[in-house]
Amino acid sequence: MMLRRRDVEQWMSHRRLPEEIRKRVQETERFRWAASRGVNEDLLLEVMTDDLRRDIKRQLFLFLKEVRIFSLMDECILDSIRERLRQKTYIRGSTVLHRRGLVEQIIFIVRGAMESIGEDGYVLPLSEGEELLTWCLERPAVNPDGTKIRMLSKGFLSTRTVRCVTNVEAFSLSVADLEDVTSLFSRFLSSHRVQGAIRYESPHCRLRVARHIQVVWRYRKKRLQK
């Protein structure tokens, strides 16, 4: 830790970074070390045998089955997803995604909390065990005839801003990796049960439904009062 801290300090000094950015870098480094104890898990797992690496990742990524859509999947699909997950850490106040920015990954929060701010200013909390950026999965992976829909290699444009309310430990799945998984298991992901689970899990879909119910109820209430 001390050696890396010295190297980072020398690098920031060499690049003449302003004090505000230096403080953020230092806080990020402290949080990353606290989350991983200085161990690069990806490098460590690379030297493991395939079966041992698979069993370790199944244990590390138990949170996947807390998301309904993934709880419906077979282990072979989940193993394919686990192989593609990468560890992420964010400090409080970090902006994970900007409105009208490119959506290039899905984030799975392990610890901490984020908030999602829509174009209308409505703030939606996101916390432990919840799937973030679900609009990636809300877009169908296949056409009704079973043919594959090509995803944009540069991602999708976001309609929301996502910020960290606290320090966050998470894992990410890139859009390119998501495309690989959906192409391999397109028949499964196109089923009505899975598509229904995607809509059920999406907080944005639930928000739209809640607003629709409110509009219908107000209209009905006005008619009853006449």
Image (cartoon, rainbow, N blue to C red):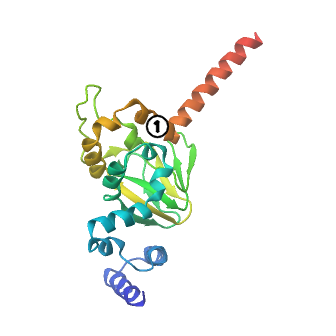
Eyeballing the image, is 200 above or below 39? Answer: above
Q: Residue at x 30, y 53 (%)?
A: 80
Disc 1 residue crowd, few under 14, some 14–19, many 20+, Cα 10 Å? some
Q: In the rendered view, does 36 fall on the left or right side of 126?
A: left
* Residue 103 visible here: no
Where in the figure is residue 185, as x and y percent of width and height? 28, 42
Mark 1: amino acid: Ala
Eyeballing the image, is 43 above or below 120? Answer: below
| Residue beneath disc 1 | 197
Where in the figure is residue 150, as x and y percent of width and height? 23, 38
Where in the figure is residue 167, as x and y percent of width and height? 53, 66
Eyeballing the image, is 176 above or below 151? Answer: below
Which residue is the extreme one toward the right?
225
Quarter of the figure with residue 147: top left
Q: Residue at x 42, y 51 (%)?
A: 98
Q: Residue at x 32, y 67 (%)?
A: 53
* Residue 137 visible here: yes
Eyeballing the image, is 54 above or below 10? Answer: above
